[in-house]
Amino acid sequence: MKNLRRFMLAAIFAAVTSVSLGAFHGAQAATAEDLNKEAAHALDKLYATNSVAKTIGSKAQAVLVFPNVVKAGLIFGGAYGEGVLMEGGKVNHYYNSVTGSWGLQAGAQTYGYAVFLMNSEAVNYLKETHGWEVGVGPTVVIVDEGAAKNLSTSTLKDDAYAFVFDQSGLMAGVSIEGTKITEIKR
């Protein structure tokens, strides 16, 4: 019985590892043009399905959009995706999103997220730090259904608002807390 349990754990680990390696490769857009299109499509889709995101987007000075982040893990896990910084509707910079985690976890999932930067201080912090860790620096509010009910253009007081979207896969929950966002060349 003990050997069977070890075999099962090894098989699960091998499966998750192979899926995650392939998935992380898929989290990278082939070209800058592909990433631009994916980000614009993801943002349009978010606006079409979430009126609060659209309202916040109209007030934001810039938007970080990560259209495809892949997360996988078995005890230790990680997430990776590439995105764009849009200012005035135009892509100005490219970034990656990297998260590491440990604990009770097994599986893989994909999701996207957008961070609406509401003021010039938040935008400048992102550009000047060359490696923003979410949770350090500008205040980021993760907007879920409960938080969305209490937001309006008159209550937008924080530096940034984040929306997670298109979550699918076999892991529960998504958090961007502790995510490292770093500028990349494209």
Image (spheres, helix red, strand yellow):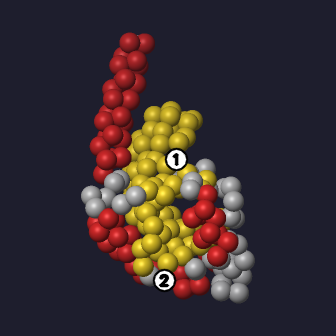
- Pick whichever of labels 1 and 2 is earlier in the sequence: 2
What residue do we see at 56% from left, 56% from top? Answer: 130
Residue 104 position in % (x across, y down): 55, 36
Residue position marked by numbered label 2 in the rendering: 88
Q: Examine the rendered structure and indicate whether residue 39 appears above or below residue 57.
A: above
Residue 112 visible, this angle: no
What residue do we see at 69% from left, 65% from top? Answer: 139
Looking at the rendered image, the disc whose residue lies closer to the viewer, 1 or 2, is: 2
Q: Examine the rendered structure and indicate whether residue 51 appears above or below residue 183.
A: below
Q: Helix, strand, or loop for circle 2?
A: loop
Q: CA distance from mark 1 to mark 2?
A: 28 Å
Dot 2 amino acid type: Gly
Please tell me in which quadrant of the rendered image residue 48 appears.
bottom left
What residue do we see at 29% from left, 66% from top? Answer: 34
Please tell me in which quadrant of the rendered image residue 146 appears.
bottom right
What residue do we see at 44% from left, 82% from top? Answer: 89
State the quadrant of the C terminus. Answer: bottom left
Residue position marked by numbered label 1 in the rendering: 99
Residue 135 position in % (x across, y down): 66, 56
